[in-house]
Amino acid sequence: MTHSLHRQGPEESLKKDFVVLAMGTGAGAMAAQKARLSRRFPGLYKAGKAVYRLLRGLKKGRGVHQKQARKGPVIRGAVVLDSREALRDYLKMLKEADTGRPVVVSGLVDEVDGCLREIGLKPHTVQFSLGVFGKTERLPAEDVLQMTTMCGHDMVAPKLVEKWAEDVRRGKMPKEKAVENMARLCRCGIFNRARALEILDRQ
């Protein structure tokens, strides 16, 4: 199960929102691959400050943010990509790296499946979100949910999203600043900044 499965929004918006999660022991190939990818893909967002420090350290030749486990160092990482093309190239590079580590991809199933087929891969398991049940009338507005569900731990507060969006509409705050404020609340680091900017533009 992944905490990135419940992102909401129209199909055209979700076509620009892909999350790739990786977790496992053995820093080696996967960590080095992340460092190369961070330089290659401008649409790739490092997930959280911890992973940012990891990537920055690897670029400088240091192995940082590694926790020693019984079987070796543990590296946890996640990236967010804002196009199908970037996802395809990213997965192709992970395939070529052949790290032997499990990778979880979240996104529209047809888009993800299409990328996998193009590079000769097939999913081990497919999970679907069945939606939200209960007193849905108590949920925030749809445009707010598009923002808050981009955090896997529900740490982007709806009231703050509403306030910052209103500040943007009134010219009190640049939309880039509003998006960074929202992203900072997301401790899991899978908030899609590019998509959030587009959502603000539509409001």
Image (tube, helix red, strand yellow):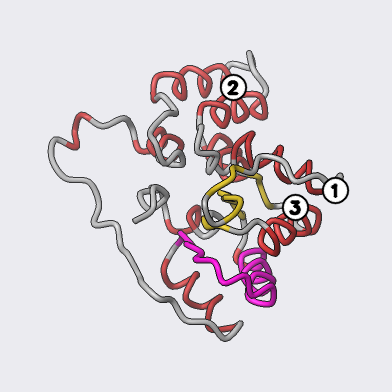
The location of residue 145, given as percent across then percent down, is: 38, 37
Could you classify mark 2 by the number of other residues whose Cα lies within 10 Å: few (under 14), some (14-19), or many (20 or more)?
A: some
For mark 2, what is the residue? Answer: 168
Q: Which residue lies furthest to the bottom in this view?
A: 120
Q: Which amino acid does label 2 sit on?
A: Val
**CA gap, disc 2 and disc 1:** 41 Å
Q: As drawn, is 200 to the left or to the right of 96?
A: left
Q: Nearer the viewer, residue 60 or 177?
A: 60
Q: Which amino acid does label 1 sit on?
A: Gly
Residue at x-position 52% and y-position 60%: 15
The location of residue 22, given as percent across then percent down, is: 54, 57
Residue at x-position 69% and y-position 71%: 93
For mark 3, what is the residue? Answer: 38
Q: Residue furthest left?
A: 134
Magenta span covers which residues? 85-107
Q: In which quarter of the image is the N terminus?
A: bottom left
Q: Which label is found at residue 83?
A: none
SS under mark 1? loop
Q: What residue type is labelled 3?
A: Ser
Question: Total label count?
Answer: 3
Q: Which of marks 2 and 1 is in front?
A: 1
For mark 1, what is the residue? Answer: 61
Could you classify mark 1 by the number of other residues whose Cα lies within 10 Å: few (under 14), some (14-19), or many (20 or more)?
A: few
Q: As drawn, is 151 to the left or to the right of 85?
A: left
Residue at x-position 39% and y-position 25%: 158
Quarter of the rendering containing residue 135: top left
Quick check: is 104 in the magenta stretch? Answer: yes
**CA gap, disc 3 and disc 2:** 30 Å
**CA gap, disc 1 and disc 3:** 15 Å
